[in-house]
Amino acid sequence: MSPQPNMITHVTVGPEIGRYGFPNGHPFGPHRMGLFWEEALRQGLDAHLRVNKPVPASREALERFHTPAYVDLVQELSETGEGFLDYGDTPAFPGVFDAASHVVGSALQEMENIMAGHCRRAFVPIAGLHHARPERAGGFCVFNDAGVVIHTLRIKHGIRRIAYVDIDAHHGDGVFYAFEADPELIFADLHQDGRTLYPGTGSSEERGKGAAEGTKLNIPLPPGAGDSHFAQVWPQVVAFLQEHKPEFFILQAGTDSIAGDPLTQLRLSPTTHFLVTTRLIQLAESLGHGRVLALGGGGYNGKNIAKGWCEVVRAMVETPVARRDSPG
């Protein structure tokens, strides 16, 4: 397909981010991007997309969120492919630095495409590594691409009010605690109750600290919760976002919240991923900017990865642009 320069939706796919995955039967394996893209091609979604190649992040970009010592450690262990980048969940593998750098660089590339007006919506399937902390990895996440994007929006574009919405089954602790005291990072996370699942955080009482109190919304869901339960609590998120009027939306669209995931116990269907994405786009359009960046996140059931992420992209392709939108 010859990509058209100004399509509404961009997607980044390529072997550089496809290689972000752990070997030896690890649940976060290097097969995940291919599963999504094969299904996207089968559905004909590519005809409606601008497809971009992955790009690496600079060292300077990585250090907008991560400590220099941690970036050094990832580079070091990437050479040998031995050891762990956290307390035992996230092993190093040969080339992990390059793969993780391309994840961050691709998220930044699509954010820049949105900010430049080349598109209004974008999706990066291998991204949304929301457990990584500034000083260490966590939960299969090496570099926190969402965290780097948030800092870059502030530094390069002066965007202050940013919404981060997370529907992965696991709480986005790496993003939450990094911005817990930031009143302009509007955080909404629906996840399986942390008392039953890694990382054990994200109670409804965690609402932000200091001046940021009330700018964070954590909604724990009981194991077994499905679409109907999600639909009951989702209006809280919509009202919360409407109140704060974000200038940019980031969606972490993990598919491990879909029924049948081997690591989690939620029972959503891919329809919820479509509806959430559609509603966020509608909110962004109603605010005049239309800026929505979706990141793939977790998910360890191959069929769910393919269907869930394609529903995210389908929502991006099908949701109309508001007539009263403003440029950029």
Image (cartoon, helix red, strand yellow):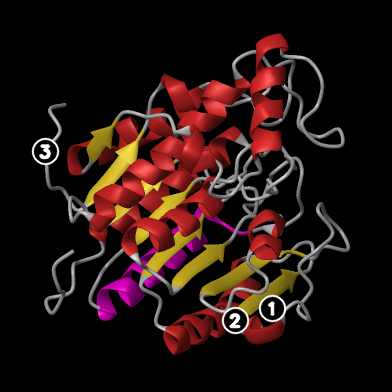
Quadrant in the picture for residue 75: top right
CA separation in Å, label 1 and label 3 = 42 Å
- Describe the element under mark 2 as helix, strand or loop: loop
Asked if 238 appears above or below 197 in the picture, the reply is below
Mark 2 nearby-residue class (10 Å; few <14, some 14–19, many ≥20) = many
Query: Upstream in the sequence, badge 2 or badge 3?
Result: 3
168 relative to 18 in the view: left or right: right
Residue 125: say if magenta: no
CA separation in Å, label 2 and label 3 = 38 Å
- Which circle marks residue 75 in the picture? none
- Asked whether 255 or 162 is in front, the reply is 162
Asked if 228 appears above or below 170 in the picture, the reply is below
Residue that carries the numbered disc 2 in the rendered image: 215
Query: Which residue is pictured at 53% across the width and 65% down the height?
Result: 165
- Asked whether 282 or 74 is in front, the reply is 74
Residue that carries the numbered disc 3 in the rendered image: 4
Query: Which residue is pictured at 59% across the width and 16% down the height?
Result: 95
- Describe the element under mark 3 as helix, strand or loop: loop
- Which circle marks residue 208 in the picture? 1
Quadrant in the picture for residue 73: top right
- Describe the element under mark 1 as helix, strand or loop: loop
* Residue 31 visible in the picture: no
Mark 1 nearby-residue class (10 Å; few <14, some 14–19, many ≥20) = many
Q: Which residues are magenta?
A: 268-287
What kind of residue is marked 2?
A: Thr
What kind of residue is marked 3?
A: Gln
What kind of residue is marked 1?
A: Gly
- Asked whether 283 or 106 is in front, the reply is 106
Query: Upstream in the sequence, badge 1 or badge 3?
Result: 3
Q: Are marks 1 and 2 in contact (CB under 8 Å)?
A: yes
CA separation in Å, label 1 and label 2 = 6 Å
Q: Quadrant of the N terminus?
A: top left
